[in-house]
Amino acid sequence: MTKPRRNFTPEESLSILQEGEREGQAVTIRKYGVGFILASQSVRDFDTIVFENMGTKIALQLEGETAKFMAENFGVMDRTTKESVMRMLPVQKNMRALIRNNHYEPFA
């Protein structure tokens, strides 16, 4: 796992954000080794492109169409694994999560 390269002062952070507006957020963020934590109670708050660029996904209990949307965007390619994700999401117990990380296999 990569450690952050450095901390930024508020002035530097503002400069990075302004540069991000000019060049595109994702490119600028990666250039400086910055990561974000995105959290929401609804997976539909994020576009599919956001899921494609996430390194780690953590899914708690989801049902119905929300579970289907997350299974489709969880980062697994084969149909059998997607179906497994779809079966697991609705039955997640409290304090349990399904985790997918692009750097470590398999997901659990």
Image (cartoon, grey):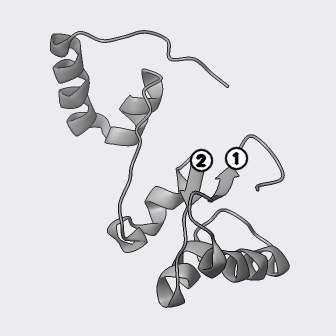
Say if 45 sits above or below 35 in the image. below
Under mark 2, the amino acid is Thr
Apparent side of residue 50 relative to residue 19 in the rendered image (left or right): right
In the displayed structure, 102 sits above or below 48; it is above
Q: Position of residue 106 (x, y in %)?
A: 83, 53
Q: Residue at x 73, y 77 (%)?
A: 82
> Sequence order check: which comes first, mark 1 or mark 2?
2
Q: Quadrant location of residue 45?
A: bottom left
Identify the residue shown where x is 47% and y is 67%: 48
Left or right: where 83 falls relative to 9 = right
Give 11 or 67, whichever is nearer the viewer: 67
Q: Amino acid at mark 1?
A: Asn
Quadrant of the rendered image containing residue 85: bottom right
CB atoms of marks 1 and 2 within 8 Å: yes
Identify the secondary structure beneath mark 2. strand
Find disc 1 in the rendering and name its residue: 102
- Quarter holding the N terminus is top right
How many C-alpha atoms fall within 10 Å of the one at disc 1: few (<14), some, or many (≥20)?
some
Q: Residues within 10 Å of mark 2 (few under 14, many from 20)?
A: some
Alpha-carbon span between mark 1 and mark 2: 6 Å
Residue 18 lies, with reference to residue 11, above or below; the image says below
